[in-house]
Each structure stands twice: as C-alpha cells, then as structure tokens.
Image (tube, grey):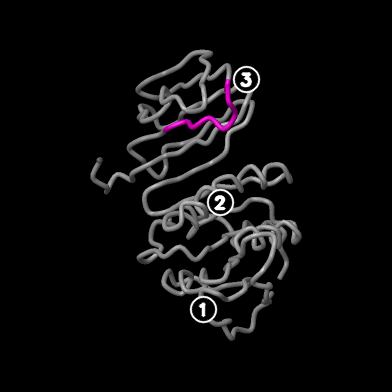
C-alpha cells in the first residue's frame, strides 16, 4: 500500500470501550492503520480495518487477515507498539496518532509517553489520545493549536529539569518568559480561554497534556 500522503494510526492493546474518541482526529486525512498485537481487538471494536499487523501475539492469537503481518519474538528489545511505529517510519509515514497505549500497566504508559521523544528524534511527529486525554511533545519554538476537540484542562509537564522562556497565550493562566522545573506543578491544570492558543518555549522540552473532554465530569 502506498504511504504517500498518509498518516499512521498506531493502535495498542490497552482496552477501550468503542474507540469513539478517535472520530474528531481521523476526519479529513488518509490513515494507514497499524495494529500492535492486541490492538487488533481494539480496531475491531472501533470498526477500523487494519492495514498492517505486528506483534508477538501474547495478547491473543495471530489474526488471519489478508494484510501484511510481522510476528515478533516474545523476547525482544522493543515493545510491540514501538515496533509498529518503527514499521510506519520505514514506510515513510512520519505523522503518527497513538491510541490504546495508556492505562493499565504504569511502566507501559510511561514508556509510551516517552516514545513521542523517540519519534521526534527520528523526524516524526506524534500524538497520544485516549478517552480522556491528548498528549503531544513540545520542544523549543512556537506552537499554535486549536481547542478542537474541546478539553477542559491543559497542562505542561516538563521533561527536562528546567524548561525556560515559557510563554502561554489564550489560556486562563498566562505565562510570560517563565521557567518551569520538572516536579513543580506551576503549569498544571490551566484552561483554554480562546479557540486558538499559543505556547512558546525558548529552551527545553515538555509534554502538552489536554484532559477531560467536555462531556466528562471534572474531578
């Protein structure tokens, strides 16, 4: 299958209800669907047809489908999800949406969040979404983004020990050339105030986490 112009939907094995939260993200683009092991079951639940299967099948038997399929050894040096991302990159697909990869085992959730850095280091761009959250990596520079779909909260979680020159615009709690320290909570639980928001970082990297869709009840 030609990858030109396509984006990659990487589906992991973390269970979900029906995948309905993906709808606003999938509209308007061509997607190639990569299922990492038990991600195939999630794809079926969401009514998505896999284009590529990969895994060691410890989450279930290998699906019998007429699509490209790679069987990995159980003992290996990367997770099924990372292997799926690696396959997408090898096909020239560098814009990836990751789902079915949060919740459950905390070690997997943490490592999957950090895969956004791994992807960026290889020239890719990624985002992680689940029923309640959207996560993307921000590095030095200026980022403009829309409040679409709408989330009630947004937080900036530093990955470097210090993230400097942080300016936030279009939010309830703006910042101007601030310094964020990893482990501090200064930039947690902000809220959108404009449809288009802007974040500038002079030095460092952080995760932008938008949480709780408008149909969710705040904590």
Image side of residue 141 versus residue 189, left or right = right
Mark 1: secondary structure: loop
- Asked if the residue at tag 1 contacts the one at tag 2, i.e. Cβ–Cβ closer than 8 Å, the answer is no
Image side of residue 8 versus residue 103, left or right = right
Mark 3: secondary structure: loop
**Which mark identifies residue 60?**
1
N-terminal of the pair, mark 3 or mark 2, is: 2
Examine the rendered structure and indicate whether residue 205 appears above or below residue 168: below
Label 2 belongs to which residue? 112
Residue numbers of the magenta segment: 155-163
N-terminal of the pair, mark 2 or mark 1, is: 1
Image side of residue 194 versus residue 52, left or right = left
Image location of residue 6, percent across then percent down: 65, 58
Real-space Cα separation, disc 3 to disc 1, in angstroms: 46 Å
Quarter of the rendering occupied by the N terminus: bottom right
Mark 2: secondary structure: helix
């Amino acid at each position: 299958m030609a990858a030109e112009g396509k984006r990659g939907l990487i589906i992991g094995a973390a269970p979900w209800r029906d995948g309905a939260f993906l709808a606003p993200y999938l509209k308007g683009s061509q997607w190639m669907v990569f299922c990492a092991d038990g991600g195939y079951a999630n794809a079926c639940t969401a009514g998505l047809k896999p284009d590529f299967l990969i895994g060691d099948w410890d989450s279930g038997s290998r699906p019998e489908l007429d699509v490209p399929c790679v069987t990995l050894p159980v003992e290996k040096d990367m997770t099924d999800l990372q292997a799926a991302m690696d396959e997408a990159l090898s096909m020239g697909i560098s814009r990836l949406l990751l789902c079915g990869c949060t919740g459950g085992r905390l070690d997997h959730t943490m490592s999957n969040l950090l895969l956004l850095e791994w992807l960026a280091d290889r020239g890719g761009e990624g985002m992680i979404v689940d029923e309640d959250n959207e996560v993307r990596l921000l590095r030095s520079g200026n980022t403009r983004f829309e409040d679409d779909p709408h989330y009630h909260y947004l937080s900036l979680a530093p990955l470097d020990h210090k993230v400097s020159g942080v300016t936030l615009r279009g939010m309830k709690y703006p910042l101007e050339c601030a310094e964020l320290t990893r482990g501090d909570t200064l930039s947690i639980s902000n809220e959108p105030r404009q449809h288009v928001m802007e974040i500038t970082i002079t030095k460092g990297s952080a995760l932008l986490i938008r949480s709780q869709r408008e149909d969710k009840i705040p904590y």
